[in-house]
Image (tube, rainbow, N blue to C red):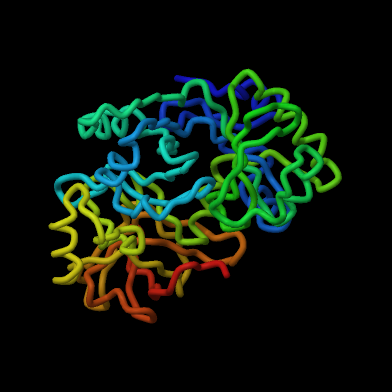
Amino acid sequence: MKNTALTEKHIALGAKMVPFAGYNMPVTYEGINAEHATVRNGVGVFDVSHMGEFILKGENALDLIQRVTSNDAAKLYDGKVQYSCLPNKDGGIVDDLLVYKIDNKTYMLVVNASNIEKDWNWIQQFNTEGVEMHNISDQTSLLAIQGPKAADALQSLTEVDLASMEYYTFVKGTFAGVENVVISATGYTGAGGFEIYFENQYADQIWDAIFEAGAAYNIKPIGLGARDTLRLEMGFCLYGNDIDDTTSPIEAGLGWITKFSKSFTNSEALLAQKEAGVQKKLVGFEMIDRGIPRHDYQIADAEGNVIGKVTSGTQAPSLQKAIGMGYVAKDFAKEGTEVFILIRNTPIKAKVVKFPFYK
């Protein structure tokens, strides 16, 4: 099992460590609900150094990205980030990812930890025009500092005006005395904040500086447990749960990152699917009766016919109610539709709601 550059810090802080995507990761420090509230109302720090980073360089870097991703990367400008996915040839998704445009010939792709090797090999097979590819995942640390107080907590560590940064933009600058840090106004929590990328050797220095600067804002370390409840309240997809090699971006409600103004892997089939309409859709639902939905629980109609399955579910700390996401037959995807989650074979009433759950 791999460690991040900060594993010893987490252990020293008393984190409960679990294996995740081949890494030894902190799942919680003081409890998921408390950590969740810290991020929603204040500021918290996630070590997400397990994520993968690829650098693509050269005249044909954009062309390669355009051919393998579903979104239109030609719309990016220097310092802009884009959410996208890598479609496979069978209508499913290899991975979802972020595309960072550094300059006209240099891009950074940020991919999911469990898919680093898979994504690298997938992109490499399309690299027919000699794009320089570097997998910098093992040398790169990534911290997500999330919450409404993030900009204030971090401002003393950089000359970059954090509060004025637009969502999904980034700059390279000096941070906590370290040069060449990527400061990105992105995150997976819906609570605002930043993600910072830097070389592993500076991990202790940057971690310590963040906690010193953020002490006045009651900054705290946050584990992957709260990361999951936070993203679920926003209706953000988790690869391996809500999207995978068998789910199409159209079914998953990711039509907004699937741009048919260009040609990409399997784009003709996905366009045909969009035009014909899908047979199943990813929806959000909240429980009406008591019960917590879990991954792979079946979803049924009032007559007991199975119409889909749960992909993610939890008791949402900010909402004080149980929520979930899942694929259902298209006739049951309309907002307000009553469905039943089969919990230990007992149908428990729920209703389809719009994303995000937390507003």
Q: Give the number of callouts.
A: 0
- Asked whether residue 145 is in view, the answer is yes
Image x and y of residue 101, in percent: 46, 43
Image x and y of residue 93, in percent: 26, 47
Who's the residue at 20% across and 53% down the image?
263
Name the quadrant containing residue 202: top right
Q: Nearer the viewer, residue 265 or 312?
A: 265
110 shown above or below 329: above
Who's the residue at 31% across and 63% down the image?
255
59 shown above or below 234: above
Q: In the drawing, does residue 316 fall left or right of residue 36?
A: left
332 shown above or below 322: below
Who's the residue at 41% across and 36% down the image?
105
User: In the displayed image of the protein, which residue is found farthest to the bottom?
Assistant: 336
- Asked whether residue 298 is in view, the answer is no
Name the quadrant containing residue 262: bottom left
Work out which quarter of the rendered image holds the C terminus and state it.
bottom right
User: In the displayed image of the protein, which residue is found farthest to the right?
Assistant: 216
Who's the residue at 27% across and 78% down the image?
302
Image x and y of residue 351, in percent: 39, 75
Image x and y of residue 109, in percent: 42, 38
Q: Nearer the viewer, residue 278 or 15?
A: 278
Work out which quarter of the rendered image holds the N terminus and state it.
top left
